[in-house]
Image: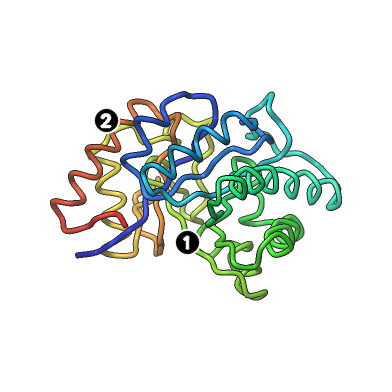
Amino acid sequence: MILIDINCDLGEGIGNEDLLMPLISSCNIACGGHAGDKATMSFVTDLAQKFKVKIGAHPSFPDRESFGRKEMNMSDEALYSTLYDQIKSLKRILDKKLLSLHHVKPHGALYNMVSVNKEIAKVVVNVIRDIDKSLILYAPYKSIIAEIASQVGLQVKFEAFADRNYNQDLTLVSRRKENALIHDAEVMFRQVSQIVLDEKVTVINGVEVTLKADTFCVHGDGKNVVQNLEHLIHRLKQNNIETY
């Protein structure tokens, strides 16, 4: 049997957390940058505790208007400050409930930028290290931020996406393009199983590219996400792949 982690971005105002939480093994909770507030963070952490799901912070650029999906030009100091405040706001809620923060996964445009931008990646790594050196970073395989985090002693789990298509350089196909998202559950299964079993992904131009992953994301706001996730888990189990 092969064990994998399936994570989901939650607390983003969709309202389907109670349906998704029983299906996943870790969650990334919006903590005020692109979505979320104290009430949603508290609600989602209670659900995570109930279903024994690992809890992560999902910080972003302070951009609720564009849901954190627009690149922002911020000073290192301003970016550090907002990310620190976002993660700490979730951590304070967890501390009161005697729960642990397991990992950090940047959101949206920030996630894409830290994959290739050394300076922004350093800021995010410094924030995580200053809050708690034992926190795990969820980051793309061969990304700049994964390399920097490893160099300073942070644990990194490589993340791949079940419901997003890839370019040949392993960047995600832009959401502005029609083929950015995968809505077909069987296609999602084929992509995840290929990465798990072969450490490769078939990218948008049909070429197979090496891709390693420890955790797989399914977006909570995806079309038919609950049904697709149920199908994905069922098909993985048929192939001796289960979540932990």
Q: Amino acid at mark 2?
A: Gln
**10 Å crowding of disc 1: few (<14), some (14-19), many (20+):** some
Which residue is painted at 80% across and 42% down in the image? 73
Disc 2 is placed on an element classified as: helix
Location of mark 2 (residue) = 227
Q: Residue at x 17, y 51 (%)?
A: 237
Q: Amino acid at mark 1?
A: Phe
Residue 213 image offset from top left, x and y in percent = 41, 61
Question: What residue is shown at x 39% (from left), y 61% (from top)?
Answer: 209
Q: Which quarter of the rendered picture does the N terminus lie within?
A: bottom left
Measured as percent of width and height from the top left, residue 3 is found at 28, 62
Q: Which mark is residue 158?
A: 1
> Relative to 211, is 226 on the left or the right?
left
Which color mode does the image show? rainbow
Task: Name the residue at 55% across, 69% down.
Answer: 155
Quadrant assignment, res 30: top right
Classify mark 2: residues with Cα within 10 Å, few (<14), some (14-19) or many (20+).
few
Taking 36 as reference, is 193 above or below it?
A: below
Total residue callouts = 2
Q: Earlier in the sequence, mark 1 or mark 2?
A: 1
Mark 1: secondary structure: strand
What is the quadrant of residue 195 in the picture?
Answer: bottom left
**Quadrant occupied by the C terminus:** bottom left
Tell me if label 1 and label 2 are in contact, CB under 8 Å.
no
**Extreme left residue here?**
238
Please provide percent x and percent y for residue 60: 66, 41
Along the line of sight, which residue is nearer the eye, 214 or 95? 95
Mark drawn on residue 182: none
Q: Is residue 116 left or right of residue 52?
A: right
